[in-house]
Image (cartoon, rainbow, N blue to C red):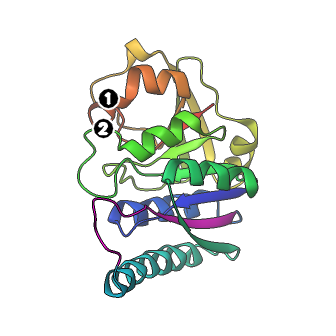
Amino acid sequence: MKIMICTVDSPAIYKLADYLAELFPHAEYHIVTVVKPVHRRVTLTKYYEKVLMDTITKAHTSVETLLKKHGVSNIIKHVLRGKPSDLLREYCETYNIDLVAITPRATAECEGLGRTAKRLIEKCRKPVLLYTPISDIPFTTTLHVLEIEDAVLPEDILAILQQRKEVVVEHKAVNELEDRMTGYDLFVAKKRTFLELLYKHICRKIWSPILIIP
C-alpha cells in the first residue's frame, strides 16, 4: 500500500502521521509538500527561500521520525512547486498512490475545508483520509468504523486493518448522524455525500478521521 501525506509544519499533520502509522506500519509513505507560486509582487529572496525550505525540512523530518517510531521503513520525500491540488493529484497518478492523507487547513480550528483540501477531494480519484484538528483519539485493540449512507470501507483497506485490529463496522444514514459523533475511530463516506452534505459541518459532526472514497 502506498500512502501520500500532504505535509506542512502543523500539529495536525503530526497527529495524522501518528494515526496512519499505527494503522498501516508496513505501507510505503510519500511525504509531499507543495510550494505555491509567489504572487502580489512579492520577491522570492534567498532569505525567504531559506526560511521556507528550513520549515519544510522540519516538517518532513518530524513526520519521518513519527513514522519510524511505528516501524515504518519505506519513506519517500518530495517538494513540488506549483498549484497544490493539481500537482498532488498528478503525483498520485504518477506514483500509484493508494491513499491520500490531508488535514482541512494548515493551521487553526476546522471551520470547514481549505481551498486546496476541497479541490483535492473533488478531483482526486483515490480515497482521501481527512484528519481534522479535533481527531485526537486514543487507540485500542478494536477499531470502530462508521459507514455513512451508501459508503463501504474498501476491501483492501479493511483487510490491512484487520491484520492489526478487530474492526467493528456500523452503518448510518446522514439524517441519523448526531450533532457530535463520538465513539468511532474512522468514518467512511462517498465523495458526493461528503461534499454535498457533510463538509460544511465537519467540526460539528465528525470527531474522528473520515475516509472519503470516490
Horizontal arrangement in the rendering, residue 134 relative to residue 36 (left or right): left
Circle 2 packing at 10 Å, graded few (<14), some (14-19), many (20+), is: some
**Residue ID at (34%, 82%):** 45
Q: Marks 1 and 2: CB-CB under 8 Å? A: yes
Farthest residue in the top direction? Answer: 175
Which residue in the protein does label 1 denote?
Answer: 200
Task: Report the quarter where the N terminus lies.
Answer: bottom right
Farthest residue in the front direction? Answer: 41
**Residue ID at (38%, 30%):** 199
Residue 82 covered by magenta stretch: no
Residue 2, image x and y in percent?
Answer: 71, 58
Q: Earlier in the sequence, mark 1 or mark 2?
A: 2
Q: Quadrant of residue 76?
A: bottom right
Query: Which amino acid lies under the numbered mark 1 shown in the image of this protein?
Result: Lys
Q: Secondary structure at mark 2?
A: loop
Please name whichever residue, 40 or 184, is drawn nearer the observer in this view of the structure.
40
Task: Report the quarter where the C terminus lies.
Answer: top right
Horizontal arrangement in the rendering, residue 162 relative to residue 78 (left or right): right
Picture disc at residue 112: 2
Q: Which residues lie in the magenta part?
A: 28-44
Circle 1 packing at 10 Å, graded few (<14), some (14-19), many (20+), is: some
Residue 37 covered by magenta stretch: yes
Residue 145 visible in rendering: no
Residue 50 visible in rendering: yes
Note whether 11 is above or below 101 in the view shown.
Answer: below
Residue 67, image x and y in percent?
Answer: 56, 72
Please name whichever residue, 187 or 37, is drawn nearer the observer in this view of the structure.
37
**Residue ID at (64%, 57%):** 3
Q: CA distance from mark 1 to mark 2?
A: 5 Å
Q: Secondary structure at mark 1?
A: helix
Total labels drawn:
2
